[in-house]
Image (cartoon, rainbow, N blue to C red):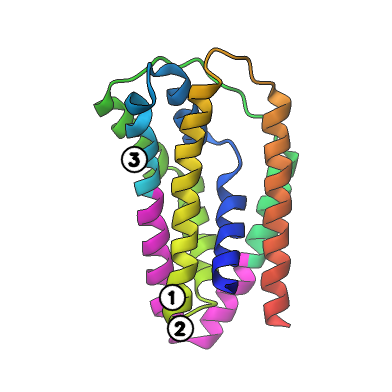
Amino acid sequence: MEPIFHGIILAFGLILPLGVQNVFVFTQGVMQPSLLRALPAAVTAAISDTLLIVLASLGVSLIVMQVEWLRLILLIGGILFLGYMGFVIWRSDAAKMENQQAMPMKKQVLFALSVSLLNPHALLDAIGVIGTNAVKYSGNEQWQFILACVLVSWLWFLGLMSTGALLKKMKISPTVFSLFNKVSALFIWGTAIYLLSSLL
């Protein structure tokens, strides 16, 4: 259960801040005439995250498991990165929703791909955090960790899309976005402390 719990907490902490990817999926839920029409954005974002999570976890772990000192360096680097990320997220301003028009399916897919796979923040999350945390496990435990991260990603994007549809045409206070970031920073710091304890 530890890899599953670890994966859920880590993935939730990373995905919670309302960056470009999340805002896009949410606004498509708001702007599209139905949930079905908003699915391309949410599903593309989730598939992209799944690809990044699996590649980062397996790619990094296959190399690191062979070299113990490299594993330690990556874990320490992951702890420092998480600590810094938590600080930046805690200090960040409330995300601002931008007015966006409903997009056809092709444009939704292309835009979701661009903000997912070409987003430096998303790549750093996958390689610098998910990947370095995955090396703590091996075999079935590692797959439990990966699947937990992937599950959180899918549930989050589908839930974000659904929430946007439910809150259609309602004004959302920036204070809510600010609170999301504060909670996310606490999750990130908690994960850093968890990793640190595994090195002691």
Q: Are marks 2 and 1 in contact (CB under 8 Å)?
A: yes
Q: How far is the residue under mark 3 from the one under mark 1?
A: 26 Å
Please name the amino acid that badge 1 sits on.
Ser
The reply to whether the magenta stretch includes residue 53 is yes
Q: Name the image quarter holding the C terminus.
A: bottom right
| Percent position of residue 173, x then y | 69, 21
Q: Which residue is mark 2?
A: 65
Which of the pair 57/46 is nearer the observer?
46
Q: Is residue 160 above or below residue 102?
A: below
**SS of the residue at dot 2?**
loop
Q: Secondary structure at mark 3?
A: helix
Residue 115 in the image, given as x and y percentages of width and height: 41, 37
Tag nearer the camera, 3 or 1: 3
Residue assigned mark 3: 44
Under tag 1, what secondary structure? helix
Report the span colored magenta. Answer: 49-78
Q: Residue 24, how many percent across, how many down?
A: 46, 29
Query: What's under tag 3, amino acid-wise?
Result: Thr
Sequence order check, earlier mark of 2 and 3: 3
Q: CA distance from mark 2 to mark 1?
A: 6 Å
Give the label on residue 61, or none: 1
Alpha-carbon span between mark 2 and mark 3: 31 Å
Q: Residue at x 49, y 61 (%)?
A: 148
User: Mark 2 is on which residue type?
Assistant: Met
Q: Is residue 153 visible?
A: yes
Residue extending furthest toward the left:
106
| Residue 182 covered by magenta stretch | no
With 175 as the anchor, is 66 left or right in this view? left
Q: Residue at x 42, y 81 (%)?
A: 139
Q: Quadrant of residue 44?
A: top left
Question: Can see residue 93?
Answer: no
Toward the viewer: 179 or 69?
Answer: 179
